Image (cartoon, grey):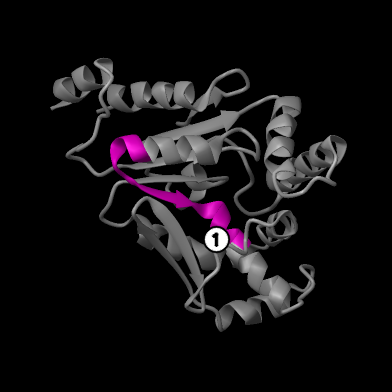
Amino acid sequence: MNTIIQSEFIKGREPRGLTKQMVITIDGPAGVGKSSSAKELASRLDYAYLDTGALYRAVAWKVAVAQIDPSLVDRIETLLSSTTLEIKFYHRVLSVLVDSREVSSYIRDEAIGRLASLIAAIPAVRDWLLPIQRRFAKGRGVVAEGRDMGTRVFPDAEAKFFLQADLGIRTNRRHGDIKVHDHHTSWQEVRQDLAERDARDCTRDVAPLRPAKDAYILDTSHLTVHQVVDRMLEVILARL
């Protein structure tokens, strides 16, 4: 089976139909291309795609709606106790429902992203989301991207990747994305925001951002998404 899959990959066809349903993790800071790479890899393997950043954004959205200051951890914990969060993956689209309401279209705002970065540092929030993420991956092939997928959420994942890139390049990418719907945020503001997020992610007490010991580290600074995914597939196929 391995030989057949590899020969199909070499010929340029997608290596679909793996008999073993694997969990593949992709971690790294913002702007390294995690989401684009994870989506393409999931598509090529015909796997489900799990964007864990969307889950933290969903919690942040509810915190924002409830007008709770992110420093008030006790109030956020109380809010979680009366919150339901559901993930659905249908026709290659990930949907997030909070209290049965589809919120995917509300959580991509840059302000929600900044709030999510603060919310993600709260241990109770990470603990609350942990079983939700693991349930989603049960019994299916999954490409999960985030910041602690390979270290905490799926420590036994069959293949783990950690993406990194130069801060300036990450800023260019992020600024380009933001300019589509926000013409007022400057390049310098985006760079500062990324640097602050990196600092929070790397120094938080619970599940700090770092590569898993068995992760394949890939610098995406000068690679296209297609090239990144090709390299990932080479690593995955070599481990089958």
Q: Residue 176 in the image: state x and y as whole percent.
A: 70, 36
Residue drawn 30% across the image and 57% down it: 138
Is 180 displayed left or right of 239 in the figure? Answer: right
Q: Residue 38 in the image: state x and y as whole percent.
A: 45, 39
Q: Residue 196 in the image: state x and y as whole percent.
A: 80, 44
The quadrant of the rendering that contains the C terminus is: top left
Q: Residue 58 in the image: state x and y as whole percent.
A: 59, 65
Image quadrant in which you'd find residue 21: top left
- Does residue 55 show up magenta in the picture? yes
Q: Amino acid at mark 1?
A: Leu
Q: Looking at the magenta stretch, what is its main secondary structure? A: helix
Residue drawn 83% across the image and 45% down it: 185
Q: From the viewer's side, name the closer residue of 181 and 93.
A: 181
Q: From the viewer's side, name the closer residue of 103 and 52.
A: 103
Residue drawn 76% across the image and 76% down it: 68
Q: From the viewer's side, name the closer residue of 6 and 187.
A: 187
Image quadrant in which you'd find residue 202: top right
Residue drawn 74% across the image and 45% down it: 197
Secondary structure beneath dot 1 equals helix
Q: Which residue is mark 1?
A: 55
The magenta span reads 43-57
Examine the rendered structure and indicate whether residue 189 appears above or below residue 2.
below
Examine the rendered structure and indicate whether residue 210 appears above or below residue 115.
above
Examine the rendered structure and indicate whether residue 223 appears above or below residue 25.
above
Label 1 neighbour load within 10 Å: few <14, some 14-19, many 20+:
many
Residue 26 visible in image = yes
The quadrant of the rendering that contains the N terminus is: top left
Examine the rendered structure and indicate whether residue 226 appears above or below residue 45.
above
Is 177 displayed left or right of 91 in the figure? Answer: right
